[in-house]
Image (cartoon, rainbow, N blue to C red):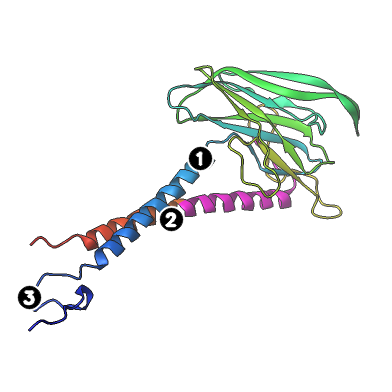
Amino acid sequence: MSSTPMRPEAVSPASGSASRPVLRRPVLRRAGVGAVLAAAAVLAAAGAASAHVTVHPESYVRGATDGVLTFRVPNEEDTASTTEVQVFLPTDHPVLGVLVHPQDGWTAKVTTTRLKTPVKTDDGTITEAASEITWTGGKIGAGQYEDFDVAFGQLPDDTGRLTFKTLQTYSDGRTVRWIEEAAAGADEPENPAPVLALTPAAGAGASEAPSAAAKSADGTGGAAAAGTGTAQAADAGDSTARGLGAAGLAVGVLGLAAAAFAVVRTRPNRS
């Protein structure tokens, strides 16, 4: 007499039997594969973000004086070295009093331009400002980066951001143009230009000092503390960014661990 076969998930293993439900294996395997893909995506995104040319700190108070901008240039080529870096400074909202910190192995050339609109300061009217800084003679190898420090006397107070378009030239002749600007609400472009945010003062009587502790411009590389409140705010922002990056890596590691656990759980018993 025929009987209706039972579905595999309804069958209980007999006493002493080593068999396991079969239909769960593909589900767990799919979960493991998904975890691996998610982890890989997180790690890849973290690596891509770190390859951009950036400016530090990310923000200053408008009209800040006597600070330092650091341009971080990573080498993203495996078979070539970075041999030249050109940073273009805006002249419609000029950075005044530019000084370049000596860099071992590199020679810096500062190009100045006559301003279309002179800038009035407490020290007089400024008619020229730096428009380009070019570093040559050095080398940034694969897996390395270089920080280029630029001191300034005063930042503009009539704009909310400064864009520093940058050209990075490699020993094989290739030039990467970090000149793209993201539109409001759009995703970050493939080759974004370094951007410095300029924020309004916190309130009446607030210090117009940098939003992060600036290095001294005397060639010693020391720190010039000014505007403690804004410096702490910038430090908090940097800590948040580092925390998010660490969290992303942690998610990737946990995803890989989950995938490995799923594979072990679904491996058939061969005994």
**Residues shaded magenta:** 222-248
How far separated are the C-alphas under marks 3 and 2?
40 Å
**Residue 29, image quadrant:** bottom left
Q: Kindly report the secondary structure that dominates the magenta region of the rendered protein.
A: helix
Identified at 79% across, 28% down, the residue is 97
Identified at 32% across, 56% down, the residue is 259
| Front label number (3 vs 2) | 3
Camera-side residue: 25 or 107? Answer: 25
Q: Is residue 200 magenta?
A: no
Are there few (<14), some (14-19), or many (20+) residues within 10 Å of tag 3? few
**Is 245 situated above or below 195?**
below
Element type at mark 3: loop
- The residue under label 2 is 251
- The residue under label 1 is 48
Q: Can I make out residue 220 in this image?
A: no
Element type at mark 1: helix
Instruction: Tell me which label, 3 or 2, sits earlier in the chain.
Output: 3
- The residue under label 3 is 16
Are there few (<14), some (14-19), or many (20+) residues within 10 Å of tag 2? some
Identified at 62% across, 25% down, the residue is 167
Q: Amino acid at mark 3?
A: Gly
Q: Position of residue 73 (x, y in %)?
A: 57, 30
